[in-house]
């Protein structure tokens, strides 16, 4: 799955506290310019969630202009899984991209991106069965761009197994118990940015269990080696990541 075609709310992170209000059958939420949930006074975008059967129809607008930004369907109000057709628009009203996510898996299958002029910029087709993944890019005059990367997620050097080993090796798993946490299971969630140069910044805990758990996860992620940065429309970009880690404190016998 390419990071570019992940819906903007998924790359900005689910599970944080948010400002929301209900208007009849509509839930309204506010987001800053990075699609991080915020208050109405500091919002850059507003999204209306309308329940339709087992999904929510989500319609987003720029706060200042009140112009349409995005239409999609998601399984909850945290944008944890987008399904069906997603359309995003430039503020001038022209279509920016059109993507289709399989229902119920939420896997991206096909997507188009357009220049603000309306001409096609990129086309992505997911690999399936014997079909290979396809990523194509075009100059505004219609000429193909060689070796064009539509989108690629930020990844740890060596892949997820190596990242997990790094966390397991460096995390002090006894932190919660040593600091007096009661017996139980505690999932800590920390979000961070992988910068264009592969460094880590803006490491913040979303949970507040205490007992040193959040601080310990933040410490380990801050000390992470460099990542391979995300790419959007053939250029390196800053990208949010979100890491859950679980501490288990066993009952003393």
Image (spheres, helix red, strand yellow):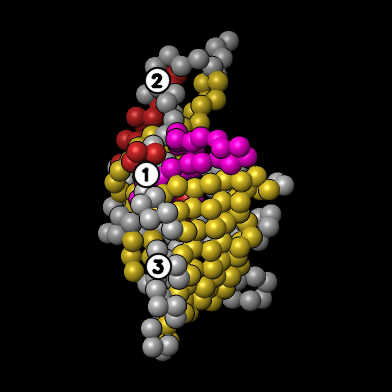
Above or below: residue 46 compared with residue 108: above
Question: Nearer the viewer's eye, disc 2 or disc 3?
Answer: 3
Q: Is residue 174 visible?
A: no
Q: Is residue 57 visible?
A: yes
Q: Is residue 104 magenta?
A: no
Question: Nearer the viewer's eye, disc 2 or disc 1?
Answer: 1
Q: Secondary structure at mark 2?
A: loop
Of the pair 20 and 63, the residue shown nearer to us = 63
x%, y% of residue 242? Answer: 44, 44
Q: Secondary structure at mark 1?
A: loop
Q: Earlier in the sequence, mark 2 or mark 3?
A: 3
Per the rendering, the mark at residue 43 is 1
Instruction: Name the residue furthest top.
Output: 253
Is mark 1 in CB contact (under 8 Å) with mark 3? no
Q: Earlier in the sequence, mark 2 or mark 1?
A: 1
Q: Residue at x 46, y 16 (%)?
A: 181
CA neighbours of label 3 inside 10 A, class few (<14), some (14 to 19), many (20+): few
The answer to which quarter of the image holds residue 168 is: top left
Q: Label 2 to label 1, Cα distance in Å?
A: 33 Å
Q: Label 2 to label 3, Cα distance in Å?
A: 50 Å
x%, y% of residue 16? Answer: 45, 36
x%, y% of residue 10? Answer: 49, 50
The quarter of the rendered structure image containing the C terminus is top right
Per the rendering, the mark at residue 211 is 2
Per the rendering, the mark at residue 92 is 3
Per the rendering, the mark at residue 78 is none
């Amino acid at each position: 799955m390419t990071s570019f075609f992940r819906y903007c709310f998924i790359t900005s992170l689910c599970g944080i506290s948010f400002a929301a209000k209900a208007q009849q059958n509509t839930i309204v939420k506010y987001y800053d310019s990075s699609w991080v949930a915020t208050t109405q006074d500091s919002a850059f975008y507003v999204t209306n969630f309308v329940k339709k059967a087992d999904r929510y129809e989500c319609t987003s607008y720029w706060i200042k202009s009140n112009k349409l930004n995005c239409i999609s369907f998601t399984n909850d109000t945290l944008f944890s899984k987008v399904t069906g057709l997603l359309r995003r628009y430039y503020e001038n009203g022209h279509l920016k991209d059109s993507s289709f996510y399989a229902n119920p898996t939420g896997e991206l299958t096909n997507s188009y991106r357009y220049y603000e002029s309306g001409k096609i910029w990129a086309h992505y087709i997911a690999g399936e069965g014997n079909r290979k993944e396809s990523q194509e890019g075009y100059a505004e005059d219609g000429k193909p761009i060689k070796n064009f990367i539509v989108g690629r997620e930020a990844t740890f050097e060596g892949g997820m197994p190596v990242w997990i080993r790094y966390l397991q090796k460096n995390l002090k798993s006894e932190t919660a118990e040593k600091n007096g946490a009661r017996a139980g299971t505690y999932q800590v969630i920390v979000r961070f940015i992988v910068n264009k140069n592969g460094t880590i910044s803006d490491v913040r805990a979303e949970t507040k269990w205490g007992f040193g758990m959040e601080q310990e996860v933040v410490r380990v992620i801050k000390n992470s080696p460099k990542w391979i940065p995300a790419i959007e429309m053939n250029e390196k970009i800053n990208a949010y990541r979100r890491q859950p880690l679980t501490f288990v404190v066993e009952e003393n016998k």
